[in-house]
């Protein structure tokens, strides 16, 4: 088993001691990629986008950039974990996911949290096979 660091300048750099993603080549067909959480930071400016919806859009765009850098596609996502500072936005996130993914949808956990890095309102992390 070997780990490979995934990095792209099309998504923000990690805010701490972690990688944007790590791929692991197991003894079966395919490589599992564990993507770190992405928040709504615009990689061009380094600033957090304004408002919940804009942050969700940017966080998913950042996640897609990391997945592409790993050689994958969103259709390969097996599991998503979403973090929301306000679970009242659950319906909006569901609508965004319906526009980004097709059936069968990936497995998903949605967690309500008190706060996120940089004051973000939303974070997404993914696990996929490439």
Image: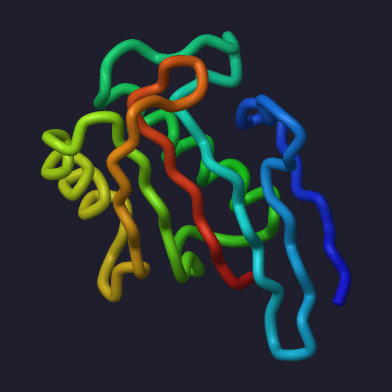
Residue 107: image location, x then y, percent: 35, 69
The quarter holding residue 12 reads top right
Residue occupying image coordinates x 47% and y 30% = 39
Count of number-bearing discs: 0
User: Residue 23 appears in which quarter of the rendering?
Assistant: bottom right
Q: Is residue 45 left or right of residue 15?
A: left
Instruction: Estimate the x, y position of residue 106 in percent, counting from the top left.
Output: 36, 68
- Residue at image x 68%, y 59%? 71
The answer to whether one can see residue 59 in this image is yes
| Horizontal arrangement in the rendering, residue 21 relative to residue 49 (left or right) | right
**Place of residue 41 in the rendered image (x, y in percent of width and height, measured from the top left):** 50, 21
Please identify the quadrant where the N terminus is shown. bottom right
Query: Is residue 13 in view from this perspective?
Result: no
Q: Residue at x 73, y 42 (%)?
A: 19
Snapshot colouring = rainbow
Residue 117 is left or right of residue 70, and the answer is: left
* Figure check: 61 above or below 50: below
Q: For the view shown, which residue lies furthest in the bottom direction?
A: 28
Q: Position of residue 128 (x, y in %)?
A: 55, 66
Q: Residue at x 60, y 51 (%)?
A: 35
Q: Going by the image, does 63 lie left or right of 72?
A: left
Q: Is residue 57 above or below residue 45?
A: below
Residue 67's place in the image compared with 54, above or below, is below
Front residue of this view, candidates 69 and 93: 93
Q: Residue furthest front?
A: 114
Q: Quadrant of the C terminus?
A: bottom right
> Which of the pair 73/84 is nearer the observer?
84
Say which of 43 and 120 sits in front.
120
| As drawn, 25 above or below 3 | below
């Amino acid at each position: 088993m070997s780990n490979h660091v995934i990095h792209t300048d099309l998504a923000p750099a990690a805010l701490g001691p972690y990688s944007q993603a790590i791929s692991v080549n197991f003894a079966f067909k395919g490589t599992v990629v564990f993507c770190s959480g992405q928040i709504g930071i615009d990689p061009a400016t380094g600033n957090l986008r304004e408002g919940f919806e804009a942050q969700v859009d940017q966080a998913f765009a950042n996640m897609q950039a990391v997945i592409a850098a790993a050689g994958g596609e969103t259709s390969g996502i097996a599991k998503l974990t979403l973090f929301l500072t306000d679970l009242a936005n659950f319906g909006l996130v569901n609508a965004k996911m319906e526009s980004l993914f097709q059936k069968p949808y990936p497995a998903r956990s949605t967690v309500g949290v008190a706060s996120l890095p940089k004051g973000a309102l939303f974070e997404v992390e993914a696990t996929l096979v490439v």
